[in-house]
Amino acid sequence: MAVIDVYNLQNKKTSQIELNEEIFGVPIKKQVLHQVVVSQLNKRRTGSASVKSRSDVRSSGTKLWRQKGTGRARVGAASSPTRRGGGVAFGPSIRSYAQDIPKKVRKGALRMALTDKFQNDRLMVVLDFNLPEIKTRHFVEVMSDFGVNKALIITEDKNENLEKSSKNVPWVKVMRYQGLNVYDILNHDHLFLVQSVIPKIEEALIP
């Protein structure tokens, strides 16, 4: 079993806990992490860019002038893409960029991301993150004691003091363990886990 230290908000060691090696000690496959991250980012794309094709433009279907005898080029409907006010040829339409990833692969990628943070000493376990008041300055002082700058903090339940104190700090993100995902773990230099969420994460990700 892997062992990690537990700290309080003053960055003082209080105890040690064991981590499940099936969660925090798995082989890391970069291609799997890449696949899951790309899938997450694609799901965030709105895919709302859209234009009208010639079938969507409201116009008369009558031929503008007769086919022969005028000396002008032949022409069809006014909705033709070659005419002003006509439809757009091969333009974008509303679509979904989502890529389905099997649940087994998503869980495996989460285990790899957690393993990466643990093996590179970027995982911090804190006893709790209960701040005495809502104050950004106090929160920044706590984070400076740990010597980190870009961090993801995972809590068990709603923590109003922590969430509001960190709201205006651009290099910190706070979320509950239910929303833990590969992109946010990899996108932040350090990962903070409140001690009480570790059994819940291990239970959810056990192979």
Image (cartoon, rainbow, N blue to C red):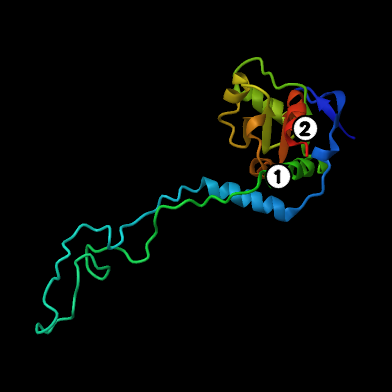
> Image point 70% across, 25% down: which residue?
142
Q: Amino acid at mark 2?
A: Met
* Position above or below: 13 against 148: above
User: Which is in the foreground here, disc 1 or disc 2?
Assistant: 1
Q: Secondary structure at mark 2?
A: strand
Could you say which is closer to the camera, residue 132 or residue 54? 54
Rendered residue at 65%/25% (across/down): 139
Q: What residue would you read off at disc 2? A: 124
Q: Nearer the viewer, residue 80 or 160?
A: 80
Proximity of marks 1 and 2: CB atoms separated by less than 8 Å:
no
Q: Residue furthest top?
A: 132
Residue position marked by numbered label 1 in the rendering = 104
Query: Element at badge 1?
Result: helix
Q: Earlier in the sequence, mark 1 or mark 2?
A: 1
Residue 16 appears in which quarter of the rendering? Answer: top right
Question: How busy is the neighbourhood of tag 2: few (under 14 within 10 Å), some, or many (20 plus)?
Answer: many
Q: Say whether residue 59 is left or right of residue 182.
A: left
Farthest residue to the right: give it. Answer: 1
- Residue 43's x, y, as percent? 54, 47
Looking at the rendered structure, the kind of residue marked 1 is Lys
**Front residue of 17 and 132:** 17
Say which quarter of the image contains residue 200.
top right
Residue 67 coordinates in the image, percent (x, y): 14, 79
Give the alpha-carbon distance from disc 1 to disc 2, as whole Å: 26 Å
Residue located at (70% from left, 50% from top) = 33
Rendered position, 97 above or below 78:
above
203 left or right of 92? right
On the image, the x and y values in percent for residue 115 come to 79, 42
Residue at figure coordinates x 40%, y 52% from the top left: 94
Determine which quarter of the picture holds residue 147. Answer: top right
